């Protein structure tokens, strides 16, 4: 489980093929790898991945962490598009006593959206995302959505698109500040909304 509060950005060191899967290696400030165990879960661009190896550099200033990514994850997320030098959002899983500043995020990406417009006005920034219509019913005005792992509040909602409004701190801490129009972005809808809507739809279908 995650909070959707991105802790830092990691840098892609390499993406390679390994026995039918992709091996992703990231460079990350060493402080974020302290007390890490093999098999731990880390959200990379909002996608929950399992640590298969990690190592700390001299004086633990910078470390590297390794993940293996299967075809299903590559199909549903933007991780298959990563290239060397690219920045990704990084959040370790919640520990007891962690402040829940965002919303509960599972790290299971539902779909991807296209960043279709960026609008800056002074320090204000709004992003417009276009997403498949099948997912729009789960995206509700003033509800939550995880975008590349960042917990954000939904602004205006249209038939096939929605807006989020970003403060400068979010743009600085996350890779959304590096995003461009037409980029493919990972989306996880709010799980509570997802469950409620699906439950109501099944009930209505079975009782018609």
Image: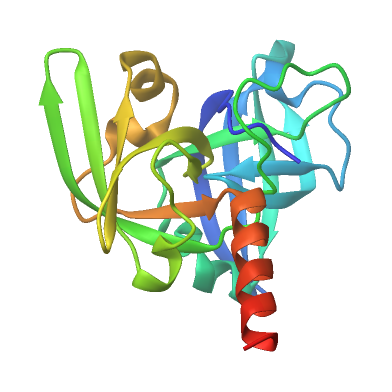
The answer to whether residue 20 is seen in the rendering is no
Residue located at (31% from left, 15% from top): 168
* x then y, percent, for residue 195: 67, 60
- The answer to which image quadrant residue 23 occupies is bottom right
Question: Which quadrant is home to the N terminus?
Answer: top right
Decide if residue 48 is on the left or right side of residue 185.
right
Q: Residue furthest front?
A: 208
Decide if residue 133 is on the left or right side of residue 120.
right
* x then y, percent, for residue 123: 19, 13
Identify the coloring.
rainbow
Position above or below: 91 against 168:
below
Decide if residue 174 is on the left or right side of residue 102.
left
Which is nearer the eye, 124 or 26? 124
Residue located at (48% from left, 40% from top): 143
Residue located at (52% from left, 69% from top): 76
Decide if residue 85 is on the left or right side of residue 58.
left
The answer to whether residue 171 is seen in the rendering is yes
Which is nearer the eye, 207 or 63? 207
* x then y, percent, for residue 145: 49, 44
* x then y, percent, for residue 59: 72, 10
Which is nearer the eye, 41 or 95? 95
Residue located at (53% from left, 52% from top): 189
Position above or below: 34 against 93:
above
């Amino acid at each position: 489980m995650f909070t959707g509060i991105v802790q830092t950005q990691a840098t892609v060191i390499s993406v390679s093929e390994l026995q039918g899967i992709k091996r992703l290696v990231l460079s990350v400030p060493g402080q974020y790898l302290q007390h890490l165990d093999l098999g731990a879960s880390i959200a990379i661009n909002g996608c929950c991945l399992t640590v298969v190896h990690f190592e700390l550099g001299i004086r633990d200033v910078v470390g590297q962490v390794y993940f293996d990514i299967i075809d299903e994850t590559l199909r549903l997320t933007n991780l298959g598009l990563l290239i060397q030098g690219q920045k990704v959002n990084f959040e370790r899983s919640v520990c007891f006593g962690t402040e829940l500043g965002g919303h509960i995020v599972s790290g299971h990406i539902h779909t991807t959206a296209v960043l279709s417009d960026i609008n800056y006005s002074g320090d204000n920034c709004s992003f417009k995302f276009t997403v498949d219509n099948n997912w729009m019913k789960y995206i509700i005005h003033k509800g939550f959505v995880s975008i590349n792992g960042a917990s954000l509040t939904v602004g205006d909602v249209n038939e096939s698109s929605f807006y989020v409004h970003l403060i400068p701190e979010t743009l600085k801490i996350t890779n959304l500040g590096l995003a461009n129009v037409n980029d493919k972005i990972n989306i996880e809808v709010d799980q509570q909304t997802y469950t409620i809507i699906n439950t109501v739809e099944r009930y209505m279908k079975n009782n018609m």
